[in-house]
Image (cartoon, rainbow, N blue to C red):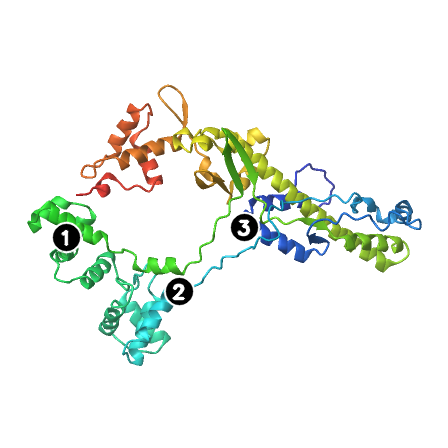
Amino acid sequence: MALKQYLAQKLEQRLSPQQIQLMKLLQVPTMELDQRIKQEIEENPALEEGAEEKEEDEYDNDDDYDKDDVNDKDDDADFDISAYIDEDGSDYKTKANNTSKDDEERVIPLSGEQSFQEKMTEQLHLLDMDETQFMIADTIIGNIDESGYLNRELDAIVDDLAFSANIITTEKDVEEVLIIIQDLDPAGVGARDLKECLLIQINRKQDGDITKYTAKIILEQFFDEFTKKHYDKISKKLEIEDQDLKEAVAEILKLNPKPGGSMKESSKNHQQIIPDFMITEFEGRLELTLNGRNAPELKVSRDYEQMLRTYAEGAKTSKSDKDALQFVKQKLDGAKWFIDAIKQRQNTLLLTMNAIMNYQKEYFLTGDETNFKPMILKDIAEIVSLDISTISRVANSKYVQTGYGIFSLKYFFSESLSTDSGEEVSTREVKKILSEAIEGEKKKRPLTDEKLADLLREKGYNIARRTVAKYREQLNIPVARLRKEL
């Protein structure tokens, strides 16, 4: 088949660079917006931070300067200078100055501590070990995961030492060093499974106490029964009273199943959440405000506007001035586009959050989760006449401060469920009732999923057992057998 060239017309929809920029800005939370604005200011010298100076333009009273003459001389450039120059001195402010000049802005520093492995290695230097043992210990620590467990087989560590460090050793030697590591802090580190981890910790606590001794026997001989909460079997085989068993189990529950986790949490930098919106209640009325803390005042550079005039005068005769004119024009376009995008972002955020606030008005007034109305992205999109994807971008990584705490916007979206009377209720309301029922159950005989489904049916919620199980898992609540207590 021969190749042919032909012309064809087709209609397609594409996003402009400005629309793409707006979509990206909508997804950015307040904490990151400040960095995004600073990045734009660094890349575009025509964009400046600060309030617009309300000054009379130096060219307004200049008889020798006529903008119409400049436009006539620059017909080839095909643009209007007046579109790039802000004659009325208007500006767009993204935040209000609510602080006094005497207020002192304080920044809370975040501390970065040593990693889990680094703290373990520090303890190694305090031990009396030869060079070979130290290399083995260092390799073992490098293979301990963030929870504090050694998930690598000892024979694999022997191979690693032979190939990477040219150290010939045996599994017995590695295990001897591992036992030394298991004596380090935190207690339980270096264990190969949960049982070994708990036994290391309970052995350190042995001080002749009968309860701790019973806890040790349970872990050594009845670990499977303990994990499955078959307490009747344990008490029968050990021939102990329920109260003694209860005290021993309570001692086991004090142990840390993830010894490395506590050290990991202490070394992690926690980022503070700054809400994007604030909702306050005043005499039964809700008031919504947008947090503009990290959106500084922006303006187009006056210097670049003056440069535009200067280069426009010589663009007709000088090629270098014409190239400079196009560069200045491009930077001014970018600055105006960015300011407009920030403005549209703020307007879209307010419009969307206002719709959410009015939709969930009963909850924001009372703070009661049972007053949640079923709400999906489509509901809000129809109210504000925006696309569902836009609402999704607004809800992403955004937070609102209410009188009942700080919540993610995604928290307020939930599916609907029909009651026996045909009323549409939020699944969050059902989860709240389910959570309260489990909190009030008798722990000796916790409610099964089937009984929970029956309880909800009595309240008018026609829910299947598998749906109850799904909601329970979403609430991170274990099955009835694992909720059992003595």
- x%, y% of residue 225? 16, 49
Q: Residue furthest front?
A: 102
Residue linked to disc 3: 31
**Horizontal arrangement in the rendering, residue 54 relative to residue 397 (left or right):** right
Residue 79 in picture, x, y percent from top left: 82, 46
- First along the sequence among labels 3 and 2: 3
Q: Are marks 1 and 2 in contact (CB under 8 Å)?
A: no
Along the line of sight, which residue is nearer the eye, 50 or 1?
A: 50
Local SS, label 2:
loop
Q: Is residue 241 left or right of residue 350?
A: left
Q: CA distance from mark 1 to mark 2?
A: 35 Å
**Residue 391, quarter of picture:** top right
Which residue type does callout 2 highlight? Ser
Q: Residue at x 27, y 28 (%)?
A: 455
Q: Secondary structure at mark 1?
A: loop
Left or right: 463 in relation to 51: left
The residue positioned 73% from the left and 45% from the top of the image is 5
Q: Are marks 1 and 3 in contact (CB under 8 Å)?
A: no
Q: Which mark is residue 115?
A: 2
Q: Residue furthest top?
A: 421
Amino acid type, residue under disc 1 in the picture: Phe
Res 2 visible: no
Q: Earlier in the sequence, mark 1 or mark 3?
A: 3
Decide: is 145 above or below 402: below
Residue 459 figure quarter: top left
What is the quadrant of the C terminus in the image?
A: top left
Instruction: Point out the frontmost of discs 3 and 2.
Output: 3
Label 2: few (<14), some (14–19) or many (≥20) C-alpha neighbours in 10 Å: some
Secondary structure under badge 3? helix
Q: What residue would you read off at disc 1?
A: 222
Q: Nearer the viewer, residue 192 or 286?
A: 286
Say if residue 307 shows up in the picture: yes
